[in-house]
Amino acid sequence: EIITEILIPAPQPGLKSSYRKVRARRSWDFALAGVALALHFDGVRVAKSRVFLSGVAPVPWRAKEVEEEITGKELTAGTIAKAGAAAVKKAEPLSKNGYKVPLLQAVIEETLETIRP
């Protein structure tokens, strides 16, 4: 069998998504830390959210703490800061990658800042 077509539905109204990664070099490289998110907005409030982190676990990591912090709320500076802090609150970095904790928090906050309505 050969795949000849893939149909992707049109995005729903109010959907915004983004992916951002931080890497050591400007050229192609593995992510040191990254965030992929899809947010459904109802006006200025986040109605539904899905947030995944990369570069911090062997597989993409769903950040339910971030989702819980932003869902039902407007993305204000305070909400964004709380979401970033929630993402790393339970972080247990290995001995040589503790630098990823503040890096991850910053990339989450920056991505939320750029995606808000």
Image (cartoon, helix red, strand yellow):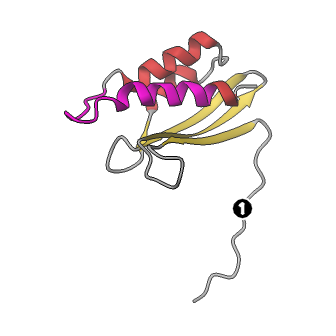
Q: How many marks?
A: 1
Q: Residue at x 73, y 39 (%)?
A: 15
The verdict on residue 95 being magenta is yes
Q: Locate residue 55, reporting x and y percent.
A: 39, 44
Q: Quadrant of the C terminus?
A: top right
Residue occupying the far top of the picture: 78
Left of 107 or right of it: where is 42?
right
The verdict on residue 79 being magenta is no
Residue type (three-letter) at the residue carrying disc 1: Ile
Q: Along the line of sight, which residue is nearer the eye, 67 or 31? A: 31
Residue occupying the far left of the picture: 95
**Is the residue 9 above or below the residue 92 in the image?**
below
Q: What stretch is highlighted in magenta?
A: 91-112
Left of 98 or right of it: where is 109?
right
Q: Residue at x 69, y 31 (%)?
A: 115
Q: Which residue is drawn at 52% across and 42% down?
A: 21
* Secondary structure of residue under mark 1: loop
**Is the residue 108 above or below the residue 1 in the image?**
above
User: Does residue 114 appear in this view?
Assistant: yes
Q: Quadrant of the N terminus?
A: bottom right
Q: Mark 1 points at which residue?
A: 8
Residue 76 location, quadrant: top right
User: Does residue 67 appear in this view?
Assistant: no
Q: Along the line of sight, which residue is nearer the eye, 35 or 46? A: 35
Q: Locate residue 114, reporting x and y percent.
A: 68, 29
**Is the residue 117 above or below the residue 1 in the image?**
above
Q: Locate residue 72, reporting x and y percent.
A: 62, 20
Residue 37 location, quadrant: top right
Q: Locate residue 74, reporting x and y percent.
A: 67, 17
Crowding around mark 1 (Cα neighbors within 10 Å: few <14, some 14 to 19, many 20+) is: few
